[in-house]
Amino acid sequence: MTETKAEIRLPTQELRADLPFYMKQLGFRLDMIYPADDPQIAVLSGHGLRLRIEKGAAEAPGTIRILTDDAGFAGGARSLTAPNGTRIEVDELNPPVVTPATEHAFVVRRLADQAPWVIGRAGMEYRDLIPTRLGGAMIASHIRVPDGPVPDMVHYHKVGFQLIFCVAGWVDVLYEDQGDVRRIHAGDCFIQPPTIRHKVLHSEGVQVVEIGVPAEHVTEIDHEMKLPTPHFRPEREWDGQRFVHNIGRDGTFAPFRIPGFEARDTTIHEATKGVVTLGRPRTRGAFLMVFPPRRETHDQALVQAPMGLRAFRAGDRSLPRRHPAPARAFHGAPTLPPELHAPGPAAGNQQATKNGDHCWPPFAPFPVPPYPCSMASRQIA
Ligand SMILES: [Fe+2]
C-alpha cells in the first residue's frame, strides 16, 4: 500500500518565532523539525493542511484561509499576520445564505439576441437570462446539456431556493433520499431544497430553465455520499423545504385568476412553505412564478416562455399593448408580457427540437384585448 502526502512550503527568517504562533494561536501541531541543533525546517499540520516552513525559502509568504464554526478561534481575530509574513484570514465555515434586496426590473432576453452560451459546470451550457441578477437576488439560466452521459459528481448548492423547469428533452437525475433515478421531461419541474445532494446522470435533447436565489451561491462536492441513498424519505425537509418533482402531464388545470387562462398548481408553494409560488399557466409552456423575497416588498414574478424569461413586479397595472422589440432589456416600470393577455394553445403542443431554440410555435397575435392584471396575490393557481 502506498502513501502520498502534499505540503505547502512557506518561507521564514526565524523559525523560533513561527512555531508558537502556528501551534498556540492557530492550533497546528508539529509533525517534524530538523536539524535538532539548529532547526531550519518545520512541518506542521492542522485543519486539513500540511505546512513546511523553511528558512530562506524563495516563495512568497502567501495567505492561509481558515474556515471555522468556532467564533473564538484565534481569540476571535479575523485577520492575522504570522511572524514569517504569511497572512491568515479566518472566516465562517458555513456562512448563512444572504439574499440581497431585489432590484425589481422587467427584463426580456430572447434567443434572437444571441446571448452567448457559456460552458459551465460538468460541461453544461448556460445562457444568462437576467444579466442584472436583480441586484444579486436571483439568477435565471437557460441550460442545455450535451446528449449522453453527464460527467457530474454528487454535489449540492448552498442556496435559499432553486427551481429547475424542463423546457425540452429529458434528463435523468439522482436525489438524496428520493429513491432511484428520476427522469424530468418537458413541462416537469424540480425543486431542489437547499443542500440536497444530487447528481445528473444522462440526458437527451434537454433544455431547462434554472432559477436560483440568491444569484451567487456556492456548489460543493460531496465525496462521501453515494446515490441513490438507501432511504426513501419524500417528507424530509432541508431548511424547511421539501423536494418536489412535479410532473406536467399529471397536473390538473383549473381556471387561472387572470381571465382566459388556466393553470396547474406545481405544489411548490406548499413544499417551500410559501417561499415561492409557481403556477403553470396553460400558454405555450410558459410558467409563472411569484417570489416574495421580503414580505414588505412587492411580489416579484417571473414568466418563462419559449423565447426567454421575463421578470416583472407585482401590483403594476400598466400593460404594454405591443410585444417589446427584440434585443432590448427593459428596466424600471414592470409590465405584463402580452402573451399573458390571452390563452395560448393547450399544453402538449410543443415542437421540441434536439438542440433547439424554438420549442413551441412562435407567438401569434391574440384577438383578445389585454386584461388589467395585478400580481399582488401570492397564489397563482
Ligand atoms: Fe446541481
Image: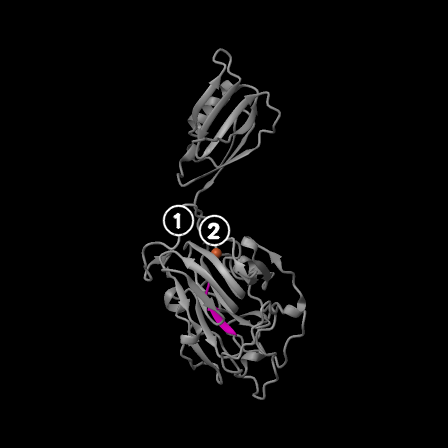
Expressed as whole percent of the image width and height from the top left, the position of residue 70 reads: 39, 38
Expressed as whole percent of the image width and height from the top left, the position of residue 311 reads: 55, 69
Q: Which residue lies at the image location 52% right of the left edge and 53% below the top edge? A: 151
Farthest top residue in view? 37
Report the amino acid beneath label 2.
Met
Query: Any atom of ligand 1 within 8 Å of the CB at mark 2?
Result: no
Q: Nearer the viewer, residue 354 or 191?
A: 354
Query: How would you classify the magenta stretch by its main secondary structure?
Result: strand
Q: Secondary structure at mark 1?
A: loop
On-image quarter of the N terminus: top left
Q: What distance separates the C-alpha of mark 2 from that of mark 1?
A: 10 Å
Q: Is residue 131 left or right of residue 177?
A: right
Per the rendering, the mark at residue 153 is: 2
Residue 350 lies, with reference to residue 295, above or below; the image says below
Say whether residue 42 is visible: yes
Residue 5 lies, with reference to residue 338, above or below; the image says above
Per the rendering, the mark at residue 225 is: 1
In this picture, which residue range is highlighted in magenta? 286-293
On-image quarter of the C terminus: bottom left
Q: Nearer the viewer, residue 45 or 107?
A: 45
Residue 210 lies, with reference to residue 33, above or below; the image says below
Report the amino acid beneath label 1.
Met
Expressed as whole percent of the image width and height from the top left, the position of residue 94 reads: 43, 46
Per the rendering, the mark at residue 334 is: none
Query: Any atom of ligand 1 within 8 Å of the CB at mark 1?
Result: no
Residue 287 falls within the magenta-colored stretch: yes
Colouring = one colour
Expressed as whole percent of the image width and height from the top left, the position of residue 326 reads: 67, 72
